[in-house]
Structure formats: structure tokens, C-alpha cells
């Protein structure tokens, strides 16, 4: 079953059961400045859950574009190292706004996974929040899951809150056991372990409490349901492949990379990480740009730039020393463009900007990498393996290395980075820049101008690359 079919079956299933199909909202959460990117299906329904907004329906289902590369949910560091985490992914979900609750939500999820998608019941495990006897009993008595395969987990995994206060409640997850070959091998490895073996497919959140400022929980008069299932993970299980990256969603990108590099995927663990990072990031940058963000030095634009530069660095690992990422945006457009037309529409711009960003970063990447390797080599001779914050800052400031590339490379060599020292050096430079501005220069570079425009909410045509070297004054 291809991913297109999985998406469709999910939405059809819930539509037949009285749910309104709601399109994905953009990656820049509309009207929610607290969030960097939309990171879950529930984001566009926040105000509905809070009772601040009424909709014409009480049941909804969606396939939501998500990015987890900053803020509360940040999977950037995981990408490439696990077989299941992405920066950009699609979350399928069903929602009840004070309509059905635990019993129906659990029955729907189980029927969909085992009947529609045909997953083998023996491979599935269930988790519930430790005190949630109600969910436990529904799974055991109504659905018939043996008690050995229902696990009670703590707040960390199975209690969800919208914020410090407000709606919250226990979760229940459907986990797929990928088998011993995927285990981290530690004796204590079991459901709840962070390794790839226990693949979290679907999370059901039961919003049944309101938390006040003292942390007291009171029951909500109309409890709600919010669920999220990762499309790429479901595709991996249904298609019987070994990682999200071998599903039809990613395979064309990985294949193109193999052609470009003349290296096979699946032969060398370290190179495979680079393959996965690049495949993931090529999608993320396309989707982020399609929703109106362009590379810059601040905020969302900087998250985008970091993702892009990280992909370029991993390309370098695979011997790609010239711009290459921009050609992968063609494949992203071909695989995703029918479902997400915005990717097609923005494609010429996405491709051009990616190429220019690559060219620009490649000008300094070689020097920066040499400097970083030399520094790491020096540090490895010492007893304490810490890269000084000053050095990290020089790489950032002079060579355009985002801090996560520095920590990533250092980590590969067993070296830590003095992040506090890096931040201190950065703060010092910022205060110098502020002083200079006070003194009346008031000049900003092209990218800064762009960021300013974004923050003012004005629609801009990106001319940064043409004007980058021209210094202008913001009025
Ligand atoms: P994990 O524990 O695997 O990191 P999570 O608990 O952070 O997942 P949720 O916030 O519960 O994930 O999101 C709901 C579902 O979305 C998950 O069950 C999973 O299927 C999917 N999902 C979450 N994060 C990612 C990601 N970074 N890449 C791909 N799919 C994801
Ligand atoms: Mg997570
Ligand atoms: Mg989890
Ligand atoms: Mg979860």
C-alpha cells in the first residue's frame, strides 16, 4: 500500500464515521506567535479545544504538515540517527471536540490499524498513563488486549498538557514491536525505551482536565480527544521496510542521492546517517519555503538556514563538494506535489534559493571544516575533550557554521562543545553591534532587512541575493 493510499484510507475511515476532513494548516501556525512551526495536528484546533472558538462540526480528521526542528519539540538532533524521526513529517489525526471520548477513540484506532491497515495484532503493544484505569480496562476488556501487552507509563511519555495551565490529560499509545534486531540491546530495553525497536505509531490524547496555576486538576465538562499518527512510520510498517527512509515517500530521494554519489545506501552506518539527513532535510526545506519562509539569520528563517546547511555538510561527507541539494527539490516536488500543490507552485523559487544558499555556504565550508578538524585534533590530544566556546563562535561568525553542525561534528569525534562559552561570545558580539547602532550607523545587511519585513508581517519579494552586499537603512 502506497503512502497516498494510507492517507486516503485514514481520512475516508473517519469521514465515514461522521468526521469533517479539515485541510492541513500552514507550517507557520496562523495566529499563534508562541510556536515556531506547526508541530502537531491539534495546533489548528487549539482555540476550539480551549472553547474560544466554535466550529460547525464536533468531529474532525486531518493530515497535518508538521515541523519539529526547534522549540518544545525538536527532533533535529535525532534525524539521521534514528530510523523514525524527521524534521518535516505528516501527522494523521482524528479529533473530538466534546463529542466521543476514550471508548470510541480507542475502538476507532484499533479497528483502523488492524482491519484497514492489516497490522498483525501480535506485534502491537499498548501504553496507558499509569493512573488511567479507564483506558486500561477499555483496551483489556473491550478490545481484548492481553494484560502482558498493556504497559503503564509515567507523565513523561503519557501525560499531555497544552501549556503550564489549561487543558491536559492522559495519553495512550499504539506501539509496534519491530523486533530484536532494532533493539538498543540494553537488558532493560522494553516498551517505553527510546530506541527504534518500540515504534510509537499512534498517540491518543484524552483531554479531560483543566490545570490551574497551582497545578490543581479539575475535570472538564466536555472532554476532548486529540490523536496523532505518523504517516511515514505507518508506511514503513505497512510496506514492510526497515526504516521510514525506505518507504515510497523517501525512496526516490535516496535513490537519486545514490546515483549522484555512486554510493549504495545500507552499506556503511556513518554514510547512511548522511543519506537520511539529506533526504529528510530536502523535504523540510522545500515545505518550509513553500509556506513563505526564506533563509535568514533569525527566527524561522534561521531554522531553515540551519537545516539547509546541515544537509550541505552531510553532502560533503558523501563527497558532494558542489551544490546538489537544489536538484533534490525536483524530486520532492515530484513525490509530494500532487498532494501539496504549494510545493509545485513555489518550486522555481525553492530551487533557486537552495542553489544560492548552497553556493554561499560552500564558499566557507571547506575552510571551516579544516579549521574545525584541526581544533578537534588538538583537543583530542588533551585530557579534557571540550571545544572552547570562542572557537565555536568563530566558526559560526566567520564561516557561517550553525552551532548544531559544530556540535554534530564534535560529537562524531567524541568532543563536547562549550555551549555556555559560545553563547557568551555571541552575547558580547550582539551588545557590540547594539552599541554601534546606538552610535548611529543603523545599518543592516540584506538578510536582516528580510527578517525585519517578515516580523512586520509584510509580504516581500525576496531579493536578498541580489542585494546582499548592498547595505541599506531600515526606516
Ligand atoms: P517519539 O516518542 O517517537 O519521539 P512523540 O511521542 O514525540 O514520538 P507525538 O508528539 O506523540 O510523538 O506525536 C504523535 C505521532 O507523530 C507519534 O506517535 C509518531 O507516530 C509521529 N511523530 C512524532 N514525532 C515524529 C517525527 N519527528 N518524525 C516522524 N514522525 C513523528
Ligand atoms: Mg518525540
Ligand atoms: Mg513518544
Ligand atoms: Mg507520543
Image (spheres, grey):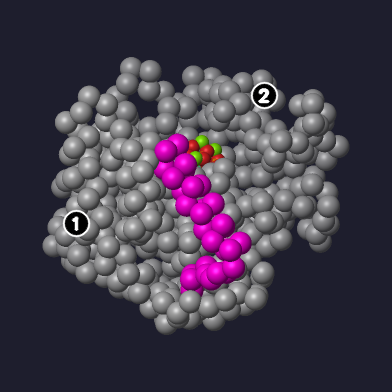
| Region in magenta | 419-448
Toward the top, the furthest residue is 187
Residue 343 left/right relative to 277: right
C-alpha span from label 2 to label 1: 48 Å
Closer to the N terminus: mark 2 or mark 1? 2
Q: Residue 354: in sight, yes or no?
A: yes
Q: Where is residue 463 in the image (x, y as percent from the top left)?
A: 48, 81
Main SS, magenta residues: helix
Can you tell which mark lies on residue 318? Answer: 1
Q: Residue shown at 48%/71% (left/top)?
A: 445
Tell me where residue 110 sits by quadrant.
Answer: top right
Tell me where residue 385 sits by quadrant.
Answer: top left
Q: Residue shown at 46%/66% (left/top)?
A: 295
Q: Is 348 rendered above or below residue 162?
A: below
**Of labels 2 and 1, the one closer to you:** 1
Tell me where residue 188 sits by quadrant.
Answer: top left
Amino acid at each position: 500500500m502506497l503512502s497516498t493510499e494510507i492517507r486516503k484510507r485514514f481520512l475516508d475511515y473517519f469521514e465515514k464515521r461522521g468526521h469533517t476532513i479539515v485541510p492541513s494548516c500552514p507550517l507557520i501556525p496562523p495566529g499563534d506567535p508562541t510556536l515556531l512551526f506547526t508541530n502537531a495536528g491539534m495546533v489548528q484546533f487549539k482555540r476550539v479545544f480551549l472553547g474560544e472558538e466554535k466550529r460547525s462540526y464536533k468531529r474532525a480528521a486531518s493530515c497535518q504538515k508538521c515541523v519539529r526542528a526547534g522549540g518544545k519539540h525538536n527532533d533535529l538532533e535525532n534525524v539521521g540517527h534514528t530510523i523514525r524521526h524527521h524534521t518535516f513529517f505528516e501527522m494523521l489525526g482524528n479529533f473530538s471536540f466534546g463529542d466521543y471520548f476514550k471508548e470510541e477513540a480507542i475502538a476507532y484506532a484499533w479497528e483502523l490499524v488492524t482491519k484497514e491497515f492489516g497490522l498483525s495484532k501480535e506485534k502491537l503493544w499498548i501504553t496507558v498513563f499509569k493512573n488511567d484505569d479507564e483506558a486500561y480496562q477499555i483496551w483489556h476488556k473491550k478490545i481484548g488486549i492481553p494484560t502482558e501487552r498493556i504497559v503503564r507509563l509515567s507523565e513523561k511519555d503519557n501525560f499531555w498538557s497544552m501549556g503550564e495551565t489549561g487543558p491536559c490529560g492522559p495519553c495512550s499509545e499504539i506501539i509496534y514491536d519491530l523486533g530484536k534486531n532494532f533493539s538498543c540491546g540494553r537488558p532493560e530495553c522494553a516498551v517505553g525505551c527510546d530506541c527504534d525497536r518500540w515504534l510509537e505509531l499512534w498517540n491518543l490524547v484524552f483531554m479531560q482536565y483543566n490545570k490551574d496555576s497551582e497545578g490543581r486538576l479539575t475535570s472538564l465538562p466536555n472532554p476532548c480527544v486529540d490523536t496523532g499518527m505518523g504517516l511515514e512510520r505507518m508506511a514503513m510498517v505497512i510496506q514492510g521496510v526497515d526504516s521510514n527512509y525506505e518507504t515510497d515517500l523517501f525512496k526516490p530521494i535516496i535513490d537519486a542521492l545514490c546515483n549522484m554519489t555512486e554510493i549504495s545506501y545500507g552499506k556503511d552506518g556513518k554514510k547512511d546517517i548522511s543519506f537520511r539527513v539529506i533526504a529528510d532535510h530536502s523535504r523540510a526545506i522545500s515545505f518550509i519555503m513553500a509556506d513563505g519562509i526564506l533563509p535568514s539569520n533569525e527566527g524561522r528563517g534561521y531554522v531553515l538556514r540551519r537545516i539547509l546547511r546541515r544537509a550541505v555538510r552531510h553532502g560533503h561527507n558523501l563527497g558532494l563538494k558542489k551544490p546538489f541539494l537544489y536538484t533534490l527539490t525536483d524530486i520532492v516536488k515530484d513525490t509530494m506535489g500532487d498532494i501539496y500543490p504549494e510545493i509545485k507552485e513555489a518550486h522555481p523559487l525553492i530551487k533557486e534559493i537552495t542553489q544560492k544558499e548552497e553556493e554561499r555556504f560552500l564558499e566557507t565550508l571547506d575552510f571551516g571544516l579544516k579549521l574545525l578538524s584541526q581544533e578537534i585534533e588538538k583537543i583530542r590530544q588533551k585530557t579534557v575533550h571540550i571545544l572552547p566556546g570562542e572557537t565555536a563562535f568563530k566558526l559560526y561568525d566567520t564561516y557561517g557554521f550553525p552551532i548544531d553542525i559544530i556540535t554534530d561534528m564534535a560529537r562524531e569525534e567524541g568532543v563536547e562543545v562549550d555551549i555556555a562559552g559560545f553563547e557568551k561570545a555571541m552575547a558580547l558580539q550582539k551588545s557590540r553591534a547594539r552599541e554601534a547602532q546606538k552610535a548611529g550607523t543603523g545599518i543592516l545587511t540584506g538578510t536582516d532587512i528580510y527578517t525585519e519585513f517578515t516580523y512586520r508581517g509584510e509580504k516581500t519579494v525576496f531579493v536578498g541575493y541580489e542585494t546582499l552586499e548592498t547595505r541599506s537603512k531600515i526606516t
